[in-house]
């Protein structure tokens, strides 16, 4: 995991020596407190920041003997405190991935070929900025089913974690997953590699399982039938595994927990999903068609579009 914030404090060797011996009775240099060693120490700091700075979210340098800060520790404290508060505010609002809105013209309603995203880079901005834009947010999702594809893991989002205009509110979801975060992307990785890392992280966060699917079937889902859905694009992965006697434990606060009569966190037969007892949203309707080759009855289809 990335450390959020690293501060590097530097000072000129001459200033450091002056501070060290200001209240001592001797000016005899020590094995470390001498100009040559301190100069080499500063060079080492610069090299470390240059070589490894990109391993951390933020590295900030502060020189403590400028005209503003020299002999004024209160000024240094003020600069650091103000900087920490500003940076933490920025870091607390996560940065998520997005495609520029031009990708919408490449997409049709429903299932799309995964190749549609290969020519679009994933950029990152603060979540609040992206939510207020017309850019498209990629969501890495997994459909967990068995080899016969007659069963599927289902979840339901908690009303406390979804907005009233979310397509997922009070709906049974045939997938788990979430947003691409900036920490999921590493230099040199393409879109699909980054999204795979997102999916692995999301699966572990949401059901506590370490699953790294090898060459899963992938496709895109785009259902712009309401303002929210226009801004979200699902990158759907089909994960087949043995579900006999399998029990998943929901570990994310986003979901209604597996208690009482709720179906959230249970493995359901596809026939039960199609029974008409459960409300479905558009992504799940598309998944039923593309993954399970099932057309949704009209009685269920009435719930597939969100009321805005």
Image (tube, rainbow, N blue to C red):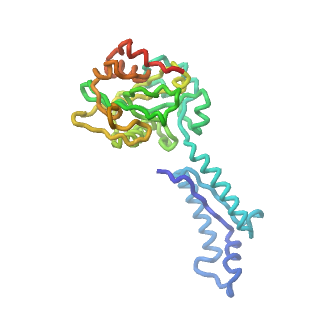
Q: Looking at this view, is 120 or 212 the one in front?
A: 212
Q: Looking at this view, is 128 or 55 the one in front?
A: 128
- Give the residue displayed 44% in from the left and 38% down from the top: 254
- Using the rendered view, name the quadrant where residue 175 is placed: top left
Q: Quadrant of the C terminus?
A: top right
Q: Looking at this view, is 248 or 237 the one in front?
A: 248
Q: What residue occupies the far top of the structure in this picture?
A: 298
Could you tell whether 254 is left or right of 56 in the image?
left
Q: Is residue 300 above or below residue 146?
A: above
> Is residue 50 something that shows in the picture?
yes
Q: Position of residue 115 (x, y in %)?
A: 45, 25
Could you tell whether 263 is left or right of 187 in the image?
left
Q: How many marks?
A: 0
- Using the rendered view, name the quadrant where residue 268 is placed: top left
Q: Position of residue 112 (x, y in %)?
A: 44, 20
- Give the residue displayed 58% in from the left and 32% down from the top: 131
> Is residue 149 something that shows in the picture?
no
Q: What residue occupies the far right of the structure in this picture?
A: 67
- Using the rendered view, name the quadrant where residue 130 is placed: top right
């Amino acid at each position: 995991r990335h450390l959020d914030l690293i501060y590097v404090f530097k000072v000129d060797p001459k200033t450091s020596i002056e501070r060290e011996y200001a209240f001592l009775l001797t000016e005899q240099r020590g094995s470390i407190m001498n100009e040559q060693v301190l100069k080499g120490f500063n060079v080492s700091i610069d090299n470390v920041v240059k070589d490894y700075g990109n391993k951390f979210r933020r590295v900030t340098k502060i020189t403590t003997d400028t005209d503003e800060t020299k002999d004024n520790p209160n000024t240094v404290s003020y600069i650091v405190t103000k900087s920490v508060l500003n940076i933490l505010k920025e870091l607390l609002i996560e940065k998520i991935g997005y495609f520029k809105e031009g990708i919408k013209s490449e997409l049709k309603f429903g299932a799309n070929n995964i190749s549609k995203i290969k020519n679009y880079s994933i950029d990152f901005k603060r979540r609040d900025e992206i939510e207020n834009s017309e850019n498209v947010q990629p969501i890495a999702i997994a459909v967990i089913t068995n080899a016969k594809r007659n069963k599927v893991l289902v979840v339901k989002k908690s009303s406390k974690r979804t907005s009233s205009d979310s397509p997922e509110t009070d709906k049974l979801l045939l997938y788990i997953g979430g947003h691409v975060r900036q920490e999921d992307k590493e230099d040199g990785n393409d879109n699909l590699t980054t999204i795979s890392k997102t999916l692995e992280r999301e699966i572990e966060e949401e059901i506590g399982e370490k699953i790294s699917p090898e060459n899963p079937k992938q496709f895109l889902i785009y259902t712009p039938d309401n303002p929210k859905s226009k801004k979200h694009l699902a990158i759907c992965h089909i994960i087949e595994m043995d579900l006999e006697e399998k029990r998943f434990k929901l570990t994310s606060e986003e979901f209604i927990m597996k208690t009482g009569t709720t179906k959230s966190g249970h493995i359901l037969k596809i026939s039960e999903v199609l029974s008409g007892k459960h409300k479905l949203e558009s992504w799940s309707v598309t998944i039923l068609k593309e993954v399970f080759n099932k057309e949704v009855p009209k009685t269920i289809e009435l719930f597939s579009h969100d009321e805005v």
